[in-house]
Amino acid sequence: MTYRDDTIATVDPSSGTASYLLAGAAGFGLGLLASAGRKAAVQAATYAAGDWFEGLKAEHAMARKILQTLAETTDEDQGKRATLVLQLQHAIGKHNVQEEYVIYCVLGEHGQADAADELNAEHFELKQALFELEMIGKEQRSGFADKVAEIRAAFEAHVREEEDVVFPALKAALSEEQSKMLTNRMNREGFKVA
C-alpha cells in the first residue's frame, strides 16, 4: 500500500491486496445472490399460486405434511425430529408474518377485527406449542408424540376456520384489484422472512 498526502490510501495492484479486495467483494456479492435465491425458492410455491388465498392454502398443506412426517417419527429419530421441528418453525413463522402483517390487517379493515384478533391469539398459542415441542425434543423427555398430536389438532382447527369461513368471506369482499394488491403485499412480506 502506498499513501499520498498522508490522508488518502491507495491500493498498489502488484501487492496482491487488490486481489483480496476483489475476492472479498465477489464473495459478498455471491452471498447476497445465494440469499436472494434461497428466499425466492422458499416463497416460490406461495407466489406460484397467483392468489393470496391459494398461496396460504399451499402453505397450510406444506405445514400439514411436515406435521404428518413428525407424527410418524419415533423416539429413536431424535435428529430427524429436530430437523423437522426447525422446518416447521420456519414455515409457520413465515406464514404467520404474512397473515399477521397483511391478511389480518385487511380483515380488520373489512369489519372482521374480532376474527383477526382470535386468529392472532391462535398464532401465539401455536408458537408457544412449537417452542414446547422443541424443548421436549432437546431434553429427550416423553410426550413428544402427544405434543405433536395436540399441535396438529389446533393447527387443523385454525386452518379450517381460515379456509372455510374467514378467508372466503374476505375474498368475496375484495375487488379483483384489491385481491391482486393483497397478493403482492403478502408475497413481499413472505419474501422478507423466507
Image (cartoon, rainbow, N blue to C red):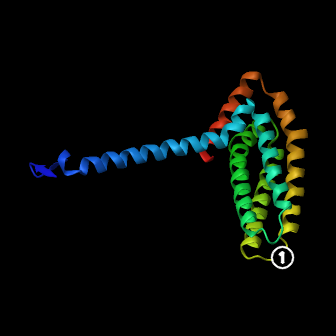
Label total for image: 1
Q: Is residue 69 above or below residue 139?
A: above
Looking at the image, which residue sits at the far top? Answer: 176
Check disc 1: other Cα within 10 Å, few if <14, some if 14-19, many if 20+.
Answer: few
Relative depth, front residue between 100 and 15: 15
Relative depth, front residue between 98 and 45: 45
Q: Is residue 175 above or below residue 157?
A: above
Q: Quadrant of residue 82?
A: bottom right
Query: For the point 72% across and 37% down, which residue is it?
Result: 46
Relative depth, front residue between 78 and 39: 78
* Residue 15 place in picture, x, y as percent: 19, 51
Query: For the point 85% across and 43% down, which residue is it?
Result: 162
Say which element carries label 1: loop
* Residue 71 seen from this side: yes
* Residue at the disc numbered 1: 142
* Residue 191 place in picture, x, y as percent: 62, 41
Query: For the point 73% across and 29% down, which residue is it?
Result: 50
Q: Is residue 68 left or right of residue 140?
A: right
* Residue 12 seen from this side: no
Q: Is residue 89 left or right of residue 34?
A: right
What kind of residue is marked 1? Answer: Ser
* Residue 96 place in picture, x, y as percent: 72, 49
Looking at the image, which residue sits at the far left? Answer: 5
* Residue 43 place in picture, x, y as percent: 66, 40
Relative depth, front residue between 138 and 171: 138
Q: Quadrant of residue 69?
A: bottom right
Query: For the point 68% across and 28% down, which residue is it?
Result: 181
